[in-house]
Amino acid sequence: MEPIQLLLAALSGGLVALLLTVFGGGGSVLAVPLLIYLVGIDQPHVAIAASAAGVALNGLTALAGQARAGRVRWPCAILFAVVGATFAWAGSSLAKAIDGDSLLLAFAVAMALIGGSMLRPAKGQGNPAVRLNRQIAPRIALTASGVGGMAGFFGIGGGFLIVPGLLWATNMTLAAAQATSLLSVVAFGASTAINYSLSGLMNWWVVGAMAAGGVFGTLIGLPISKRLGQHARLGRQMFAVLILLVAIYVGWRAIMAL
């Protein structure tokens, strides 16, 4: 890798970590387009592998910040992460068998769905003292299996699906769901990255650069997430529009390459 490519990978990791910290999901979906079109990785599978590993490490720094703030609901987080990581392995195994350009086209469709989901208003009501119990556990496991499979297939953290999944399964508050989702982001990314690395599709130099940039992105994102206040919805909508525009670009490039 050229030094400029590693610098761009670090900047990409910083941006992903910042968005992941501020919005609790959606940021990781930009990692693959950044690695392909900004950093210059020409193999989609390698970009997805590096993205998964970088997102896992960036999610770990974001998780540490949220854990110190006491926002993570650990029993729910652990169950969601363990079940989902198993299905993330299966999803990434399927993705490795698909042609790179076809995979990018599917990725563009996923990006469009993610952007559309983020345009919907998020509900902030919920139970701040939610606990894992026999009623909640099956719903968490069911949601985690589907979300984990998608996250592994596309090499993303899956926070955009984990958060609403946690809200549906547990009725916890939005802030708690965003913080709790980060453990699954880490677990899904790690499961996918290990699967790809066993097939020799991992560039660890890129991963290291993304992780280094992610530390700074998280440090910048934590105070921003606290200060957004009444502007959080507008910021999320603007971010969703950006994802939709990138989805169009990725889809067009993938179609031209087929």
Image (spheres, rainbow, N blue to C red):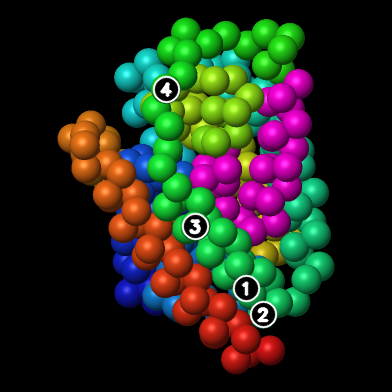
Which tag, 4 or 2, sits closer to the chain's start? 2
Residue under label 3:
116
The magenta region covers 138-162
Residue 104, numbered label: 1
Q: Disc 2 versus disc 3: distance between alpha carbons?
A: 23 Å
Figure check: 85 above or below 104: above
Figure check: 243 above or below 54: below
**Which amino acid type is marked by label 3?**
Gly
Dominant secondary structure, magenta: helix
**Which amino acid type is marked by label 4?**
Gln
Q: Disc 1 versus disc 3: distance between alpha carbons?
A: 18 Å
Q: Disc 1 versus disc 4: distance between alpha carbons?
A: 36 Å
Q: Are marks 1 and 2 in contact (CB under 8 Å)?
A: yes
Which quadrant holds the C terminus? Answer: bottom right
Q: For the residue carrying disc 2, how many other residues have a C-alpha within 10 Å: few (<14), some (14-19), or many (20+)?
A: some
Mark 4 or mark 2, which is nearer to you?
4
